[in-house]
Amino acid sequence: MTKQLILVINCGSSSLKFSLINPLSTETILTGLAEQLFTDKATIKIKYKENVKVKNILAPYDHSLAIAILVDELKALGFNDNVAAIGHRVVHGGENYSAPTLITDEVKKIIESLSRLAPLHNPANLMGITACEKAFESLPQVAIFDTAFHQTLPSKAFIYGLPYELYEKHSIRRYGFHGTSHYFVSTEAAKLINKPIEACNFISAHLGNGCSITAIKNGKSADTSLGFTPNEGVMMGTRSGDVDSGIIFYLVNELGYPIDDVNKILNSKSGLLGVSGISNDCRTLEEAMTDEPNCRATLALTVFSYRIAKVIASYTASLSELDGIIFTGGIGENSMLVRKMVISHLQILNFHIDDERNEQARFGQSGNIAANNSRSCWVIPTNEEFVIAEQTQQLLSLNNEGE
Ligand code: ADP
């Protein structure tokens, strides 16, 4: 095998997800996850073919040690010399990055400076970059930004109705997230309808623990529901999505909540978890649903689906044509119930679900779940890791051509 594999790294503050991908053959060779980093329970799980190895990570239980174990494993399997580059998922690229970017000291400084906009994500992404620079000294490292796909938003979609200086001086605007996923599923949908992506118009719904809806006009992001932070738009697993900002002042000024507690409520205690009082997990709520009028699991999924449908309907204002709706993410790919509930609110736009097709499109199966008399409506499993591998490979080929 020649040197053509890309190692994809997705670093969280206490986790590190990785995949070894051949972007040319589209094959995922090895995957894995290091979890509970910075605790004495830190482990790394590496899956290759049918084998799963789990190893403890020793003190100081950090990303570098997880990567060192991964490097040993790659050597043992004979892949180390075949890795051409490392592709990193980086959450926030601000207005600086709209394309895959070769990581240099200057780029790292900018990623660090953008940590103020993504304090939970960019510092963790940088830890992964630093660990990989040490472990793979001679290999190029590429950053793929979650926000990059949304850099095509027109100003009417990214400017808030706030004093303009807040945008100019403090960069307060809509950035959007999940860009890599919306990009992937829209390009896959374009292939399904045999049209060039530049001629396609979709509304894609990425529904996982985090949820976002994107209007895609002529293949480009035209509006998206996550905003300055990943807590705008629809309700999510534990995040509230849109709420009246007056509620925050009421909680603080009238009810005496400390502002940090309000932050926790909005980001970690709301959404499906907050409304149901049971769980943020869609599967658990589906199991707990009853016909009782006060059933909170039913209420949570009803509010969740209605709010998704409202945002989808509102995005027809961003588009002059619509080829169809795309569902993706853990809930979008698997929950027949949520898809059915969402589509039931969109009949006026001529969307109707076919129950049998809806049942078939699960567990990694894509398909059109619309009835024959309906506009198209697809389930497309997302694959952000593949996009990161492919874009890393493309950037390196471009650079090599230019030499
Ligand atoms: P993340 O945003 O953390 O990547 P995922 O995209 O993996 O999350 O989505 C997690 C969500 O997908 C959870 O709410 C989970 O319940 C839901 N989910 C996964 N499988 C199913 C299923 N078979 N039926 C309904 N919901 C599912």
Image (cartoon, rainbow, N blue to C red):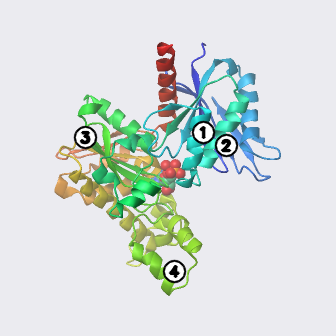
Instruction: Classify mark 4: helix, strand or loop.
Output: helix
Q: CA distance from mark 1 to mark 2?
A: 11 Å
Is 43 placed above or below 396 here?
A: below
Judge whether residue 9 can be spotted in this image: no
Task: Please name the amino acid that badge 3 sits on.
Answer: Asn
Q: Secondary structure at mark 1?
A: helix
Mark 3 to mark 4: distance in Å? 43 Å
Task: Give the Cα separation between the discs numbered 3 and 2.
Answer: 37 Å
Q: Name which residue lies at 56% across and 42% down.
A: 110
Residue under pointer 3 = 201
**Residue 326 position within the rendered picture, expressed as x and y whole percent measured from the top left:** 33, 44
- Work out whether mark 3 precedes mark 4 in sequence or the reverse, and give the earlier one: 3
User: Which tag, 4 or 1, sits closer to the chain's start?
Assistant: 1
Can you identify the residue that label 1 sits on?
A: 108
Using the rendered view, name the quadrant where residue 134 is placed. top right
* Mark 4 and mark 1 residues within 8 Å of each other at the beta carbon: no
